[in-house]
Image (cartoon, rainbow, N blue to C red):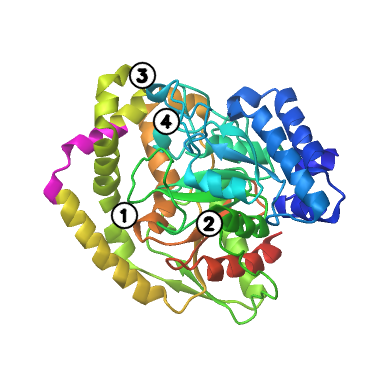
Amino acid sequence: MFDWLKMSAAQLGRGIGEGSIDPVALSQAFLGAIESHNLKDKIYSRVTHERALAEAEAAAERARAGQRLSPLDGVPVSWKDLFDTAGTETEAGSMLLKGRVPSEDARVLKTASQLGLVCLGKTHMSELAFSGLGLNPMTATPPCVNDVEAVPGGSSSGAAASVAFGLAPMAIGSDTGGSVRVPSAWNDLVGLKTTWGLVPNEGSVPLCPKFDTVGPLCRTVEDAALALSALTGAPAVDLQNTSLEGSSFAVLETAALEDVRDTPLQAFNQSVQKLRDAGARVDRITAPEVARALPLSGTLFTAEAYGTWKDVIEASPDSMFAEILERFRSGAQILAADYVDAWQGLEFLRKEWSARVAGYDGVLCPTTPIMPPNLRRLQTDHDYYIRENLLALRNTRIGNLFGLSAISLPTGIPSCGLMILGQPFGEARLLRAAAAVERRLI
């Protein structure tokens, strides 16, 4: 039974389908593991015991009748605490929303539940999702699986920890600037950033509505493909017969390889060589549009975030961690004309990028250029916090700014991820490429 806690979501789903795994016993195993774990309260903000068991019992009945709703019917999943859950507190990691209880599920949670996924509960996160570090002194800072003295990455911090520590086989998070991929990289998971608009955001607490995306954190690319299907209701991407032979990738040299620290750079270079050894063509490219786009994020993200939350924030600013409050308030200084100009400029740069990379199966770079920063120092050293937060999100932000699909894969070196940037709405091609890459990196 305890092997269940280490299995992929796809493996568990197959076990349910074959009759070797009972969904009720499976959910009980995960609920028991959660309750007995000494870091439970740093990972889960709420555990939905009654809902999980009721959903598991319904899945068990369907399995016995041969009427399963999806490959993940009966598989437990954790949810980042910004997805509305009917009757359960959904506070987005913020004291500003303390006691907020929605009356209905977020649309993605409804879809996943209708396909049989079992809701284990809600996981801790960075305040209002506005940090890539995962540090949250106001509610809880989840652990990093590779370093007890480091942060886990954010903002889907508890989501990553729930899977990495064996307290969920899969987690659902959100990604506005890297919030699925950074914690996935630092906790040796697969993290999929979906194209904006592909997965509905209705019923999720917003940060930047024009950039917010929904995606899974999981153990395998197969899990990511099945999760995407469960979030959208569309058929899962076929990952059969994928190969690196004859594929083509580009290594992004502009910005993405600057200031990369030794261990992530070593992991990246080794990964690229493995792809070449497997028969992939790997070119190195420069993309001046990336260097021009990255500074726009300061205007676009902060203006939209502050515009979304200013009234709530200014009604109770002392309820926020000072670093997050300062980041939000920086958006107050941005003129509407500058915001519009930044968006128009970004649309032009997106076209340049699309033309440059159209012939590749994916663009490669380190998911993050740094290792997980020290938790204690982040709380006492302002300059360190600002520098590490911006660096943590720098490479992942490229995918958000250009409106891309993207995925982070473990490299085999702890807390170092390989990111593949795909095309907008190119999840099928990206997942097939990632499945082939995954086999070489394991």
Q: Where is residue 355 in the image (x, y as percent from the top left)?
A: 35, 76
Mark in front: 4 vs 2: 2
Q: Distance between the residues labelled 3 and 4?
A: 10 Å
In the rendered image of this protein, does residue 70 appear above or below residue 41?
A: below
Q: Sequence-wise, which precedes: disc 1 or disc 3? A: 1
Kind of residue at badge 2: Thr
* Residues marked 4 and 2 touching at CB (< 8 Å): no
Density class for disc 1 (Cα within 10 Å; few <14, some 14-19, many ≥20) is: some
- Which residues are the magenta region? 327-337
Per the image, the residue denoted by label 3 is 319
Density class for disc 3 (Cα within 10 Å; few <14, some 14-19, many ≥20) is: some
Residue 368 visible at all: no
Q: Where is residue 24 in the image (x, y as percent from the top left)?
A: 78, 38
Kind of residue at badge 3: Ser
Q: Which residue is drawn at 70% across and 72% down?
A: 240
Per the image, the residue denoted by label 1 is 294
Mark in front: 3 vs 2: 2
Residue 375 visible at all: yes
Per the image, the residue denoted by label 2 is 232
Tell me the SS state at disc 3.
helix
Q: Where is residue 111 in the image (x, y as percent from the top left)?
A: 55, 50
Inspect the magenta stretch and tell me whether residue 428 lies in it: no
